[in-house]
Image (tube, helix red, strand yellow):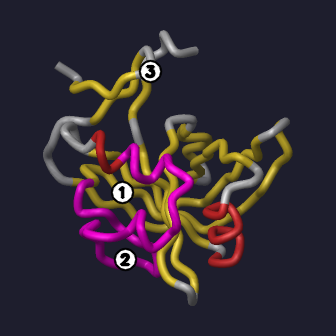
Amino acid sequence: MGRFPTGVTVITALTGSGPAGLSANAVSSLSLEPELMLACVDRGSRTLRALEEAGRFGFNVLEAGNAALALGFASKRPVEEKWREVGWSERSGIPVLDAAIVWIGCELRDVISGGDHVIVTGEVLDVAERPGRPLIFHEGEYRDLA
């Protein structure tokens, strides 16, 4: 699957302890009616626990040039370290990254077992977008769409 190019997202959630997030490229729209999204998340992820606690989460589609941000959210570093110097705001109770060209906020709907990952589905609550080129992941590297 490394030969299959994907967009790069950071999935975010907000709990009483603060923001949580992880990099993910296994994301997709699931349904138009109702509007549903899905993501595959490592079952041991701290962010999975945060989005279950929050009951809401967001997909932040990263703009090209933000590979360092994607790598930071892919790491197992302490949560506070991941969020240090990351620009974000809150919308619908969910963190929106400044580096996102598309943001989709969801209400958690399902958590489905899938091997060492789970599939989380969410009903779309809110969407925001701005112009920009997406960050792409292909053959183990972050790339610009061009």
Left or right: 9 as drawn, with respect to 14? left
28 vs 74, nearest the viewer? 74
Q: Residue 92, relative to residue 16: is it above or below? A: above
Q: Residue furthest top?
A: 3
| Residue beneath disc 1 | 103
Q: Residue at position x 23%, y 23% from top?
A: 145
Q: Mark 3 belongs to which amino acid?
A: Gly
x then y, percent, for residue 56: 58, 71
Q: Position of residue 44 (x, y in %)?
A: 75, 54
| Numbered badge on residue 132 | none
Q: Position of residue 85 (x, y in %)?
A: 25, 69
Q: Position of residue 48 (x, y in %)?
A: 67, 61
Going by the image, does 47 lie left or right of 13?
A: right
Label 1–label 3 contact, CB within 8 A: no
On the image, numbered disc 2 is attached to which residue? Answer: 91
Marks 1 and 3, the one that precedes in the sequence: 1
Few, some or many C-alpha atoms within 10 Å of disc 2 (few <14, some 14-19, many ≥20)? Answer: some
Residue 77 magenta: yes
Q: Which residues are magenta?
A: 70-99
Q: How many marks?
A: 3
Q: Determine the secondary structure under disc 3.
A: loop
**Mark nearer the N terminus (2 vs 1):** 2
Q: Label 3: which residue?
A: 140
Disc 1: CA contacts within 10 A as few (<14), some (14-19) or many (>=20): many
19 over 74 or under it: above or below: below
Q: Amino acid at mark 1?
A: Trp
The nearer-to-camera label among 2 and 3 is: 3
Residue occupying image coordinates x 29% and y 35%: 135
Q: Amino acid at mark 2?
A: Arg
Q: Is residue 69 magenta?
A: no
